Amino acid sequence: MKIPELKIRGLKPCLPIVQGGMGVGVSMWKLASAVANNGGVGVISGVEPGFSLSGYLRNKKEANKEALAYNINKARQASPSGVIGVNIMTALNDFEEMVQTAVREKIDIVFSGAGLPLKLPDLVRDSITRIAPIVSSAKAASVICKHWDRKYSYLPDAIVVEGPRAGGHLGFTLEQLRNIAEYPLTRLVEEVILAIKPFEDKYRRNIPVIAGGGIYDGNDAAEVLAKGASAVQMATRFVATYECDVDQKFKDQYINAQKEDVVIIKSPVGLPGRAIRNAYLKDVEAGIKKPFKCLSNCLKTCNPAQSPYCIAEALINAQQGNLLNGFAFAGDNVYRVNKMSYVKDIITEVMEQIRKA
Ligand SMILES: Cc1cc2nc3c(=O)[nH]c(=O)nc-3n(C[C@H](O)[C@H](O)[C@H](O)COP(=O)(O)O)c2cc1C
């Protein structure tokens, strides 16, 4: 097929591959700059990026802002002409400050999901930063466009539609996740394109739709591109790479995961999530509480008194390779990952497969 170019307002055209943001500490400057250097869009996670700084326990908010700025600058140095974004979940208590920090550092794009980022245009006002909400339904895309149109006379610079096969937190109910075959990504893409059409007509401009969740190879990508998506978002595929910022033990979990190891969990974020089942998650399933002291109330949606574990702590442990006290989020295609790769080889292979599809 003819490969579409991803054109996001004012940015140089890219290959149609966006690397999905992965918290905590999975996609930082090394992975993001590698993807950007190879022609895609690299995305730094804005979820608790400050965890490795010495001041983190004293002042998490400051450490997070400092680490986000550091990662943006490092990615920019490593990929001076590549396109770099950040992923900042709306469910974070420091959402606004983190977006403002990214804008100050002149980030190219902010991607934002896990809730409706209704105030996002206000936070990037008078800046060069583009904004791309992440949605899981045409309804959410329509609500955001309507609100941004009415309140800010602004349209999303791109929209990511994330289907139910993605890793991490999901915008679907447990019931819907039991029947994922009923929510194919191809259909979600068509529905979102239809829902945003009236806004595109009103503003006489195109909103690129980026489709993610279960895209592993170029044939998966070609299916959604054929339905009108301008690009794909891939996350799971980029974890077992030499450039990914996470500990090797985390990458090994990906390489060793079998289909039946992938589970849906109820996360303290208030959304279901997809992860690799390990002893830690088995304990949680069995109702065993993991005592913790909440230091920063990082999530708007978490009630520490009722939460069986601290998700920030579990994900930081996993990031550092301590999987006895944490777990790895992953998409449902993780069982297809069976070796370490270089980002360049993955992108070359996927592009070749799209071309041949
Ligand atoms: C380890 C991991 C962490 C993730 N963390 C985030 C996150 O912090 N914010 C977010 O919006 N999406 C997050 N995601 C979702 C990805 O950005 C992406 O949209 C999705 O996983 C795409 O599906 P795929 O993994 O099948 O390619 C995460 C996914 C993974 C695998």
Image (cartoon, rainbow, N blue to C red):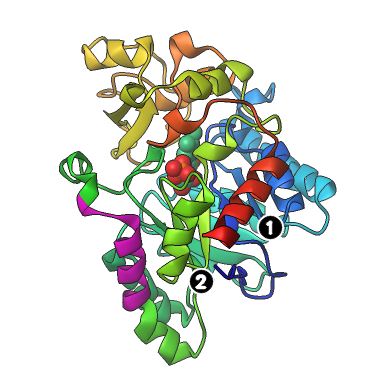
Instruction: Compare marks 1 and 2 and give the one earlier in the sequence.
Output: 1
What's the residue at 32%, 40% (across, down)? 301
Res 311 → quadrant: top left
Residue 304 position in % (x across, y down): 32, 25
Q: Nearer the viewer, residue 23 or 295?
A: 23
Q: Is residue 204 above or below residue 352?
A: below
Q: Give the label on residue 107, or none.
A: 1
Element carrying mark 1: loop
What's the residue at 49%, 79% (across, down)? 154
Q: Is residue 192 above or below residue 171?
A: below
Is residue 261 found inside the magenta-colored segment of the image? no
Neighbours of disc 2 within 10 Å: few (<14), some (14-19), many (20+): many
Marks counted in the figure total 2
| Residue type indicated by callout 2 | Pro
| Residue type indicated by callout 1 | Ile
Is residue 188 found inside the magenta-colored segment of the image? yes
Which mark is in front, 1 or 2?
A: 2
CB at mark 2 closer than 8 A to ligand 1? no
Neighbours of disc 1 within 10 Å: few (<14), some (14-19), many (20+): many
Res 226 → quadrant: bottom left
Query: Mark 2 highlights which residue?
Result: 208
Q: Residue furthest front?
A: 356
Q: Is residue 20 above or below residue 225?
A: above
Residue 270 position in % (x across, y down): 28, 38
Tell me: 97 left or right of 310: right
